[in-house]
Image: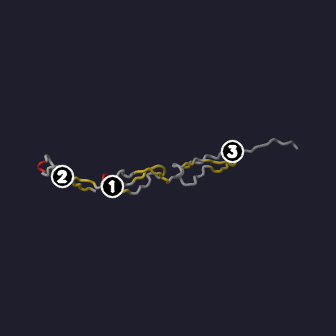
Amino acid sequence: GSHLQVRQVSCESGNPADCTGPAPASTQQCINRQGCRWETGLWSPCSAACGPGVQTRSVVCPGGPAACPSPEPQQEQVCEGTLCEWKVWDYIPCNTTCGAGYSTRLVQCPAQAACPAPAPAALVPCADSSGCAFTTGDWGECS
């Protein structure tokens, strides 16, 4: 907080009338830094639900910024939002048109390792008969 400093001011001869000009100040305002410290609030939630973001907090010195020791604590910090959801695309058609095969789709997490496990399936079995046709072998001998 704000306080007052005091000093003795006198003329060398002992008689103030012997010294010329105005006497130097015998008091001055000062800041007592003893016991002053920064007060910090809680960090805010991350600004990003998923991926990189920023957190903020209040930082206050009760006696004014000059009354607290340096450095001033951080008011902002980088954070990582962890409420990520998997992004999934549609499955592509079955890789075969006759019989058993598989179908794939793209599955991505917007922030590395921040999506809930397990990841949705990127590969599933499928069956398709739309392209099936009869096959014939050679004729056998006439009987």
Residue situated in front as seen by the camera: 79 or 33? 33
Q: Which amino acid type corresponds to the residue marked 1 in the rendered image?
A: Cys
What kind of residue is marked 2? Val
Q: Is residue 141 above or below residue 38?
A: above
Q: Residue 131 carries which label?
A: 3
Q: Residues within 10 Å of mark 2 (few under 14, many from 20)?
A: few
Q: Circle 2 sits in a helix, a strand or a loop, which is it?
A: loop
Mark 1 vs mark 2: which is more N-terminal? 2
Q: Going from the N terminus, do you reach mark 2 or mark 3 first? A: 2
The x, y position of residue 47, in whole percent, is 43, 52
Q: Residue at x 16, y 51 (%)?
A: 10
Cα distance between the residues tagged 1 and 3: 77 Å
Sequence-wise first label, 1 or 3 = 1
- Determine whether, in the image, residue 12 is placed left or right of residue 143: left
Question: Residue 9: which disc?
Answer: 2
- Of residues 138 and 25, which is closer to you in this image? 25
Which residue reaches farthest front? 13
Residue 97 position, x and y percent, is 67, 45
Q: CA–CA distance between discs 2 and 3? A: 109 Å
Q: Which mark is residue 61?
A: 1
Which is more foreground, mark 2 or mark 3? 2
